Image (tube, rainbow, N blue to C red):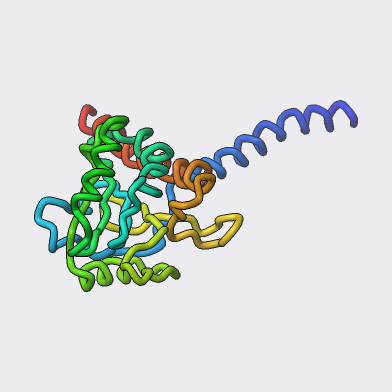
């Protein structure tokens, strides 16, 4: 009897373990879509969200001389993924913002990073509101039409985030002033979205060769 029980455990345990880990892989293979059809940047002819994996931000018209959160983002997120051609950072900036001050920040960042995939789009406050509202997040734009929150937009122009975050439940955006959140949450989530598209492309190429 004991022998049969031991054999049964030895046989069943690996199967249970496999199903557990397979389930985990399935659950984390894709980052949930929280909002579909985010507004495209039709006011910016040289920048678009479609067919790109985008970190979307709202800079506001007050540019800190030291660059503020842009340096955090560059170090904690951008440098890890800048080698991907379809990855980009896009910041919407209100018209009238000091372009020279922003350029000074960009020049400083250029000394430590290739800024090719950073896009700063100057546009009207109405356009900024329209794009921000299309995210359907629980956050609000600040008085300067900026936000500390940044968002992951996929190639189909959908907002990606977490629907089971241990701290807030539905995580629509990432607080760019919180270095720990960037390093421990956002970095992993960007990695998941990039891996998803890489796996899809690999599968497509493999099927074409058959």
Q: Residue at x 23, y 64 (%)?
A: 94
Q: What is the quadrant of the C terminus in the image?
A: top left
Please determine whether, in this image, residue 64 is positioned above or below residue 190: below
Furthest residue toward left: 45
Nearest the eye: 93 or 116: 93
Q: What is the quadrant of the N terminus in the image?
A: top right
How many discs appear? 0
Nearest the eye: 61 or 28: 61
The quarter of the displayed image where residue 140 is located: bottom left
Image spot of residue 124 (x, y percent): 18, 68
Q: Is residue 152 left or right of residue 118?
A: right
Image spot of residue 112 (x, y percent): 31, 30
Image spot of residue 62 (x, y percent): 31, 60
Q: Is residue 77 left or right of residue 157?
A: right
Nearest the eye: 123 or 77: 123
Please determine whether, in this image, residue 97 is positioned above or below residue 4: below
Please determine whether, in this image, residue 149 is positioned above or below residue 117: below
Q: Residue at x 35, y 71 (%)?
A: 143
Q: Residue at x 27, y 64 (%)?
A: 37
Nearest the eye: 200 or 147: 147
């Amino acid at each position: 009897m004991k022998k049969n029980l031991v054999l049964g455990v030895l046989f069943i345990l690996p199967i249970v373990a496999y199903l557990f880990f397979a389930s985990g892989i399935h659950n984390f293979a894709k980052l949930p879509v929280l909002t579909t059809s985010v507004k495209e940047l039709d006011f910016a002819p040289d920048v678009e969200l479609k067919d790109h994996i985008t970190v979307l931000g709202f800079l506001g018209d007050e540019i800190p001389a030291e660059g503020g959160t842009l340096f955090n983002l560059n170090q904690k997120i951008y440098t890890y993924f800048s080698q991907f051609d379809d990855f980009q950072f896009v910041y919407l900036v209100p018209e009238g913002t000091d372009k020279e001050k922003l350029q000074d920040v960009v020049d400083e960042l250029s000394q430590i990073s290739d800024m090719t995939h950073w896009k700063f789009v100057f546009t009207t406050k109405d356009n900024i509101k329209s794009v921000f509202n299309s995210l359907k997040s629980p956050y609000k734009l600040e008085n300067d039409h900026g936000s500390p929150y940044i968002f992951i937009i996929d190639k189909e122009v959908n907002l990606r985030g977490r629907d089971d975050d241990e701290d807030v439940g539905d995580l629509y955006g990432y607080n760019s002033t919180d270095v720990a959140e960037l390093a421990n949450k956002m970095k992993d989530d960007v990695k998941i979205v990039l891996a998803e598209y890489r796996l899809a492309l690999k599968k497509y190429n493999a099927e074409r060769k058959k």
